[in-house]
Image (cartoon, grey):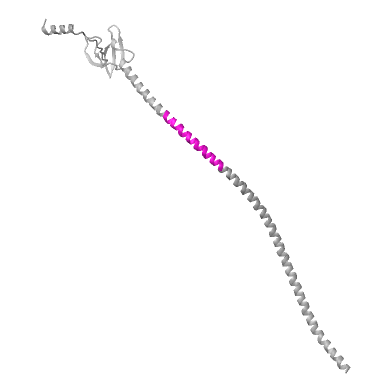
Amino acid sequence: MRPILLALLLLSLAVPATAATRYVSDDLTVPLRDGPSKRNRVLRHVKAGTPVKLLLNDKESGYSAVEVSGKEGWIANRYLQKRPGARQRLARLEKKLQQAEADKAALQKRLDELTQGAGEQQQALAAAREEAARLQAALDRLREDTRDVLSIKRRNERLGKELGALRQRFQAVQEENARLKDRTARDWFLRGAGVVVLGMLLGLILPRLRLRRRDRWSDSF
């Protein structure tokens, strides 16, 4: 026995072996051959998990004719399965998990937005209620003002009617005054004319009376 091998053997006997865990890698490739046997030439290696199109399943040889990426060949049946491999399924599950995480984050964000929106809506609702109360108060004041305006309007209408009646009375008084003025003017005119006529008559009569008196006085002497 060689000295190196003897030393390794002695070392293995002296030091107990420690148990360690290892994993077989699934990064494998499958040979695509130009015929249904190991003796046929390998055309290329197909990576595990690659989908292939099944053309023919030869159970006697244990190979199947397939088409992959536009190239036809033969692959052993033990390398073919109906479901994707664990690696592909894991990748899909990881992708779904990532999508689920993204959906969860989106839902959480939407929930936060809705919660915030609910708070804002509550504030908007409170503001709307305050505005409604303010408008109601303004409407009540407007109704009071409207009642006052209607009362003023009715009073103005009543005063207008009274003013119309006063105007009619004033116009009647003016007309009566005009008639009185005309009558007074006529009376004064007639009186003046009477005085003039009387003066004229006196002017005619008095001289004659004087002449008669003179004649009487002259006859007496």
Magenta stretch prevailing secondary structure: helix
Q: Residue furthest front?
A: 14
In this picture, residue 1 sits left or right of residue 33: left
Q: Position of residue 130 (x, y in %)?
A: 52, 38
Q: Is residue 129 magenta?
A: yes
Q: Residue furthest right?
A: 220
Q: Nearer the viewer, residue 194 or 79?
A: 194
Q: Nearer the viewer, residue 102 or 108?
A: 108
Q: Residue at x 83, y 89 (%)?
A: 211
Q: Residue at x 65, y 52 (%)?
A: 155
Q: Position of residue 45 (x, y in %)?
A: 24, 16
Measured along the vertical axis of the image, is residue 76 above or below residue 179?
Answer: above
Measured along the vertical axis of the image, is residue 145 above or below residue 76?
Answer: below
Q: Residue furthest top?
A: 1
Q: Nearer the viewer, residue 40 or 114?
A: 114
Q: Nearer the viewer, residue 205 or 73?
A: 205
Q: Is residue 105 magenta?
A: no
Task: Note whether residue 57 is visible.
Answer: yes
Quadrant assignment, res 17: top left
Q: Position of residue 120 (x, y in %)?
A: 45, 34
Magenta span of residues: 111-137
Q: Residue at x 31, y 10 (%)?
A: 57
Task: Note whether residue 85 is visible.
Answer: no
Quadrant assignment, res 79: top left
Q: Position of residue 129 (x, y in %)?
A: 52, 37
